[in-house]
Image (spheres, rainbow, N blue to C red):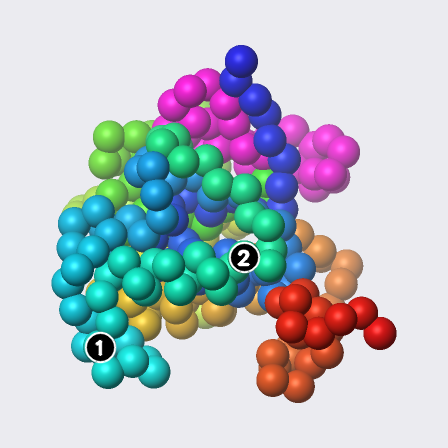
């Protein structure tokens, strides 16, 4: 039986962009569900070239695709993220306000008939989008986002939000002036996106910027420091 799940953020895509988005969102204490069409993490990185060496990853002289995906998964392990493997996201539509979603939010439909209800959505779909490589627009009046002629999703470099408030696009699937299709660019996009996603999920709260090296609160979330 198809299930309806509820969370703070629905991330579509478990490639490097999506996995690092989960990490950044976890740092600001936002829960994530991740929808991934493949049966494993890494996206194109592990599906197409798991043994291909990567030479421009910060901190590594060289690292292959599969080990990088493994490290990203290990990095987010403290957040107990729910993954929907082998599931394709086929639609995004407005959700009605309800418990846990007092301001409304989004319902991301999956191929098996299930759905994820969330306050915001992060498109981290790499070269493809929803459905069979193209985005299926939400019903009239519910809001949708804009794609370029190449099928990429336009996003704002301030926060990587699309033309539809509450829907973000990062990684190779997004487009903006000066965009560079590098994994490190996706990491930067994820970090900025998380700050604005917090504001959507908690509009009455002010997010205090903290460093993992000095914040006991963040270290507790990461499981490297016990509760005082």
Residue 155's spot in the image, x, y percent?
Answer: 37, 58
Residue 193's spot in the image, x, y percent?
Answer: 49, 63
The residues colored magenta run 90-117
Callout 1 secondary element: loop
Residue 2's spot in the image, x, y percent?
Answer: 52, 18
Residue 137 quadrant: top left
Residue 29 visible in the displayed image? yes
Residue at the (62%, 41%) spot, across then down: 7
User: Which residue matches tag 1?
Assistant: 62
User: Which residue matches tag 2?
Assistant: 77
Residue at the (60%, 31%) spot, across then down: 5
Residue 96's spot in the image, x, y percent?
Answer: 65, 29
Outermost residue to the bottom: 214
- Counting residues from the start of the chain, the first of labels 1 and 2 encountered is 1
Vertical order, 19 against 99 (above or below) = below
Residue at the (76%, 33%) spot, across then down: 99
Q: Is residue 130 magenta?
A: no
């Amino acid at each position: 039986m198809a299930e309806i799940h509820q969370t703070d953020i629905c991330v579509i895509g478990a490639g490097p962009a999506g996995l690092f988005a989960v990490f950044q969102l976890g740092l600001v204490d936002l829960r994530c569900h991740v929808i991934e069409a493949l049966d494993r993490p890494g996206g194109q990185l592990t599906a197409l070239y798991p043994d291909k060496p990567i030479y421009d990853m910060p901190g590594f002289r060289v690292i292959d695709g599969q080990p990088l995906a493994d490290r990203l998964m290990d990095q987010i392990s403290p957040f107990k993220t729910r993954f929907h493997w082998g599931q394709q996201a086929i639609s995004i539509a407005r959700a009605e306000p309800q418990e846990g979603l007092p301001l409304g939010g989004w319902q991301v439909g999956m191929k098996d008939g299930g759905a994820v209800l969330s306050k915001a959505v992060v498109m981290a779909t790499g070269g493809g989008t929803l459905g069979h490589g193209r985005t299926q627009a939400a019903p009239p009046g519910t809001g949708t986002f804009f794609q370029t002629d190449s099928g990429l999703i336009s996003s704002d470099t301030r926060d990587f939000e699309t033309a539809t408030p509450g829907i973000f696009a990062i990684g190779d699937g997004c487009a903006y002036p000066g965009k560079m299709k590098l994994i490190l660019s996706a990491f930067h996009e994820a970090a900025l996106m998380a700050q604005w996603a917090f504001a959507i999920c908690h509009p009455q709260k002010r997010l205090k910027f903290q460093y993992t090296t000095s914040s006991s609160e963040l270290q507790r979330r990461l499981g490297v420091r016990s509760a005082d």
